[in-house]
Amino acid sequence: MKNDRRTIFGWAMYDWANSAYSTVIAGAILPAYFASEVVPDEGFWGQSGQTIWGFVTGFAAFALFLFMPVLGAMADYSASKRRFLQVFAYGGALFTTVLFFATTGNVVFTLAFFMLAQFGFVGANVFYDGFLPDISTDDTIDQVSSKGFAFGYIGGGLYLLFALALIQLSSDGALAARIAIGGTGLWWAGFSLFAFSRLRETGTATPLPERFRDTFRPLAYAKIGFGRTVATGAKLLGFKQLLLFVVAYMLYNDGVQTTINMSAVYASDTLRLDTSVIALTFLVVQFVAFAGALGFGWLAARLDVKRAIQINLVVWIVVATVAFFLPVGQAVPFIATGAVIGIVLGGVQALSRSLYGSMIPEEASAEFYGFFSVFSKFSAIWGPIIFGFVSAATGSGRNAILSIVAFFALGLALFSAVDVDEARRSRERWSFAPDPTEV
């Protein structure tokens, strides 16, 4: 299967399929629809839609963080990535489709099915990412990974364009938003069916360690998954520069994830913008992010990757500060801010992943990328929760924006202290004793 064009195309098409969820459900339409239509005008339990969405998004990220090691262990041991990918993808698509029935006042219903859909989305991505080393080689893995990103940006953007046109042309904006939300699940499932037809199972199953043979299998996977995460974290303590980068990344990535999760509901609740304006802004972000990733890659080649990320984070700080001052009811400033976010969004995601890859030992890259994935999810917990607390305490989403600025500023300060050359040299000092979970 390695470097087989048909297989790679099928794998990349899954990114096309599920990116509609990223743009519509996690990004542009559902959060804004939830704040403007689902939550009553008087609020719910005394809280606004943006406050509730912040809390729920943060706690959902925490729940996913707890399950990530278990899913990673399943991928490593069961050689059933395709099967698990199908279960999580189709399950997430089904729960997404059910969100069509989210109407005014159905706050708990909407939040419950959003969390179920989110679990399917994130869980499927664990197994989707796990296919990458199976279908590529060292000399093609970057191009294959980039192809998946490219397909995702295009697929998600096209579906968002459809959703935006539907909302703009409809006389009933709320119904059009519900159709776009429910249709996301159909898009996800339909293109997944095509993707899976070209993607075959890989690898062979690894027997569970002898001491787990009589243990309930999901519990055994949980013990192995969490054990590996703790072991990798313990090793990391001995490598100061790599640890410093991971902590810095967790801080500024929290700022990035909070921006993605909260911008639509902030635009709806605080800036009083229509769903169509918010969807158009996310559409701009979707296509600009692709160019941003390429542009910052070019910048990193001409300067260096550390300098490029520092420039990127400075722009993030400026943009988050500008968002604090955005006027109510004016679409153009919000769309312009979104365009700048698109540029730095694509850049920071691409460069952070590649820089981390240059710092870790090659012989344990899968283990360390699994660790990176876990803490990427962990870092996404706190920003939305803090946003929700500040919004609730002050009664203003604008004040909550300042918490995002703080995440970027602290992340930039720590990242600037990272000695990238030393982190790369330290790869030679790693040693790997036999994994006790294998004994």
Image (cartoon, rainbow, N blue to C red):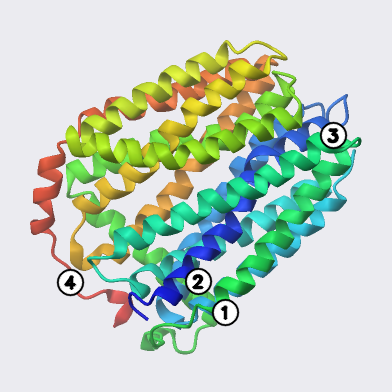
Q: Secondary structure at mark 3?
A: helix
Q: Position of residue 362 (x, y in %)?
A: 19, 63
Answer above or below: position of 138 versus 112.
below
Q: Secondary structure at mark 2?
A: helix
Q: Is residue 70 visible?
A: no
Q: Earlier in the sequence, mark 4 or mark 2?
A: 2
Residue 148 location, quadrant? bottom left
Q: Earlier in the sequence, mark 1 or mark 4?
A: 1
Are there few (<14), some (14-19), or many (20+) residues within 10 Å of tag 4? few
Q: Earlier in the sequence, mark 2 or mark 3?
A: 2
Quadrant that contains the N terminus: bottom left
Q: Is residue 232 visible?
A: yes
Q: Which residue is mark 2?
A: 10
Q: Secondary structure at mark 1?
A: helix
Residue 37's mark?
Answer: 3
Q: Which residue is mark 4?
A: 433
